[in-house]
Amino acid sequence: MNNQYSIIIQWSDEDQKYVVSLPEFGPYAHTHGNSYEEALKNGQEVLELLIEDYQARNKPLPKPSNFKIILEV
């Protein structure tokens, strides 16, 4: 899969798992994993399913976010 969508992985002390967010697809696009690697794999699978669902319903895909890093010296 080659796309430009964001996958954010954060540790949750409350859940004792890595929580994955897919921000371009809204606040409910989440998954999780017991390890970072598992969380990334699950996030990629959910992202693929979301893209397939959008395409099957002829719904336009969200625009990928563009993050800029600004360094101040």
Image (spheres, grey):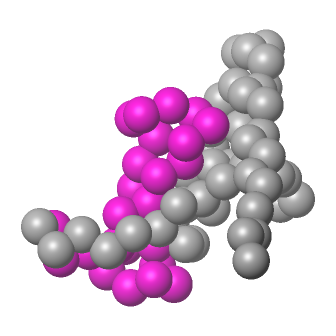
Task: Name the foreground residue: 16 vs 38.
Answer: 16
Image: 69 above or below 34? above
Question: Residue 22 placed where, x, y %?
Answer: 55, 47
Q: Is residue 32 visible?
A: no
Determine the residue located farthest toward the top in the rendered image: 58
Q: Is residue 27 a member of the stretch shown in magenta?
A: yes
Image: 38 above or below 50? below
Residue 36 relative to residue 11: left or right: right
Task: Name the foreground residue: 50 vs 13.
Answer: 13
Residue 9 relative to residue 49: left or right: left
Image: 63 above or below 17? above
Residue 22 relative to residue 48: left or right: left
Task: Name the foreground residue: 70 vs 4.
Answer: 70
Residue depicted at x 36% and y 63%: 19
Question: Residue 15 placed where, x, y %?
Answer: 15, 68
Q: Is residue 48 visible?
A: yes
Residue 33 relative to residue 17: left or right: right
Task: Name the foreground residue: 54 vs 68.
Answer: 68
Residue depicted at x 74% and y 42%: 65
Question: Residue 17 placed where, x, y %?
Answer: 26, 74
Q: Is residue 8 a member of the stretch shown in magenta?
A: no
Image: 22 above or below 15? above
Residue depicted at x 77% and y 40%: 64
Q: Quadrant of residue 59?
A: top right
Residue depicted at x 58% and y 34%: 25
How many marks are shown on the rendered structure?
0
Locate the C terminus and report the quarter of the image it occupies. bottom right
Question: Residue 57 placed where, x, y %?
Answer: 71, 15
Q: Which residues are magenta?
A: 15-39
Q: Quadrant of residue 1?
A: bottom right
